[in-house]
Amino acid sequence: MPTLIFQIGKFFLQCLWFFLPIGFANMAPVFARKINFLNVPVDFGYSIAHKRIFGDHKTWRGILAGVLIGECVFLLQRFLEQYPVFTALHFTSYQTLPWYFGALIGFGAVFGDLIKSFFKRRKNIAAGTSWIPFDQIDYILGGLIFSLIVVRIPLSAWLTILILGFLLHIATNHIGFWLGIREQRW
């Protein structure tokens, strides 16, 4: 029984470890919003059928921040992998993954968010209004799908990462709201 509990715990930690660059990439645009560099909407203000493509809140600055933070977190994980405690936390050796893997899944995370925003605009859901569960899983799906370009992880890991990411997203948004970083709780 202790071995089974250990294996389940290890699996959850591996899922969390794989999720970290995706999760931080998703948070990066929020922390970069005070930077004026590239504060230009991705859709450049264009509309389709009188509806903005993505809206003012989706900027090139946010995309760049997500890609850079995703890459930085991955490179930190890759560095930490030299220590045995961190070696157990991955599905595959991060040393064998290409150096740009973090940027790739970071881009996947912000791309997933863009796709969701596109559909929110089509459904007349205002920017900043919650669209459960899509607001909580869009970036996770984007990051995981883009990870397929380089690495395969078990389907059970995908499902676990989606659930963990969903719960962590809710928790971090609530904390951000209480700290005054976010305007919306959800």
Image (spheres, helix red, strand yellow):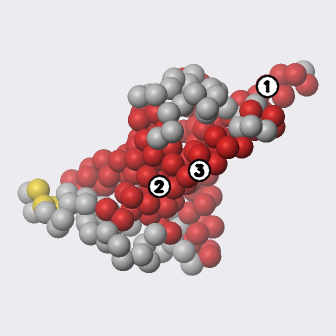
Real-space CA distance between mark 3 and mark 1, rounded to the nearest whole angstrom:
25 Å
Closer to the observer: label 3 or label 1?
3
- Tag 1 residue: 7
Q: Amino acid at mark 2?
A: Leu
Q: Amino acid at mark 1?
A: Gln
Image quarter of residue 161: top right
Q: Amino acid at mark 3?
A: Val
Q: Residues within 10 Å of mark 1 (few under 14, many from 20)?
A: few
- Tag 3 residue: 73
Secondary element at image label 2: helix
Which residue lies at the image location 51% right of the left edge and 39% below the top edge?
A: 99
Lower sequence index among marks 1 and 2: 1
Secondary element at image label 1: helix
- The answer to whether one can see residue 127 in this image is no
Choose between 84 and 139: the one closer to the eye. Answer: 84
Lower sequence index among marks 2 and 3: 2
Name the mark on residue 128: none
